[in-house]
Image (cartoon, helix red, strand yellow):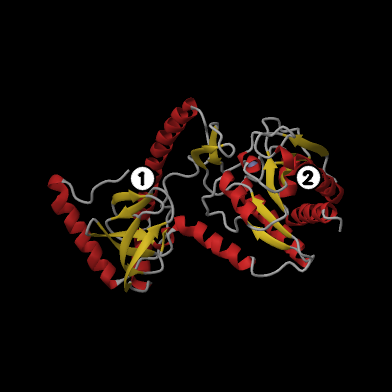
Amino acid sequence: MIEKCFRGKWAAVFLCVVLIAAAMAGLAGCSRKYGEISLTEAAGQAETDAGAVAAQEEENKALMLEDAEGIQAAESQAVADLSEVESDLTTASGFSDVDETVYITDDLVNIRSGCGTEYSIVARLNRGDSVKRTGSSEGWSRILYHDEVCYVMSEYVSTENPDEANVTALENRAAAQETVASNGIIVAIDAGHQAKGNSEKEPIGPGSSTMKAKVASGAVGVVTKLPEYQLTLDVSEKVKRILEERGYQVVMIRETNDVNMSNAERAQIANESGASVFVRIHANSLDSSTVHGTLSMCQTADNPYNGGLHAQSYSLSKIITDAICAATGSKNRGVQETDTMSGINWCTIPVTIVEMGFMSNPEEDQKMAQDEYQELIAAGIANGIDAYFGK
Ligand SMILES: [Zn+2]
């Protein structure tokens, strides 16, 4: 949703506002901060049917309304705090002149006519949109939007294109592969999900006409509200550290939440990484709050894409699940065989999805959010990998 900077008879009024703002900005930068993002995770969960898409649109509309109220609240707050704002203006450092392209790092970021939330919103830009930055201060950036001077909070712009984070991930992986495993074994670890799901479709397996959403943003802790993508990354980093201490080389599919990598892409990266096994780390969620415990998943022996990997994948799944349960005392829910997972079907190496526990179970959610419990899970996964390779 983008509004034009200038429109009809209001042009002169807006022009004045912009000129005054530009003049103020020339004197001083702004440092006050208010929330500047409109939509949160609405688009996160991947939905596959048309009904869900329609529902999502309704939800988006509702969120936009909520957001409009949020802006009003922020603006009245800004007016109420005017004296404080003025005091900030006199103490803040000025804009330093720059001439560079910057990228918006989130969706529906407000672009304002002046450097303060009391100024009108002239546009909302989305993640990956680029603008020219002409001035930079700690709080605000002065930008050119449709050749007009506008302002955006500096925390929502970056000189790095967020959609090129994948490239960085690839470079990190290439660097990791330069270090040779002292025990000769490479393990690929995928921290499940990412900050924002991607509901675009991809084939569920090589050559398949069955399509599935590329990647979901995952579950959320019923008590802790911890997002699954953060939990999986926290545990994956611990697994990496432990495995490297034991002489393995670890290929991390992602090392930040800010990526956009489909489940099929993750599998293909693992395939090409030189890894002997692919361990996908996830946490579970159900409508029931009573179900708890650890399980893992692999393909069936009849999987049309990689059924030949079933025996090894089953063995990897079972041995890791058993080792996690031994380390944590979690209830062992065994191995589930399924051919519905793109991230398994695209694999050409033995693969397992480890569901560490249920984020829908209050007790298990709270345990999994703890650093010490995550260490136990990570040690269990590493012990399982050791056992799989006969170490
Ligand atoms: Zn998951």
Query: Which one is in front in this view, the residue at disc 2 or the one at disc 1?
Result: 2
Q: Picture quarter containing residue 312?
A: top right
Foreground: 203 or 361?
A: 203
- Residue 184 x/y as whole percent: 76, 64
- Residue 82 x/y as whole percent: 34, 59
Q: Amino acid at mark 2?
A: Gln
Q: For mark 1, does the 10 Å Cα neighbourhood hold few (<14), some (14 to 19), or many (20 or more) residues?
A: few
Which residue sits at x=60%, y=49%? Answer: 268
Ligand 1 falls in quadrant: top right
Quarter of the image with the C terminus in it: bottom right
Label 1 secondary element = helix
Asked if the residue at label 1 sits under 8 Å from ligand 1, the reply is: no
Label 2 secondary element = helix
Labels 2 & 1 near each other (Cβ < 8 A) = no
Give the CA distance from mark 2 to mark 1.
Answer: 58 Å
Which residue sits at x=19%, y=62%? Answer: 19
- Residue 77 x/y as whole percent: 39, 52
Residue 81 showing in the rendered view: yes
Find residue 72 and name its label.
1
Foreground: 83 or 391?
A: 391
Q: Amino acid at mark 1?
A: Gln
Asked if the residue at label 2 sits under 8 Å from ligand 1, the reply is: no
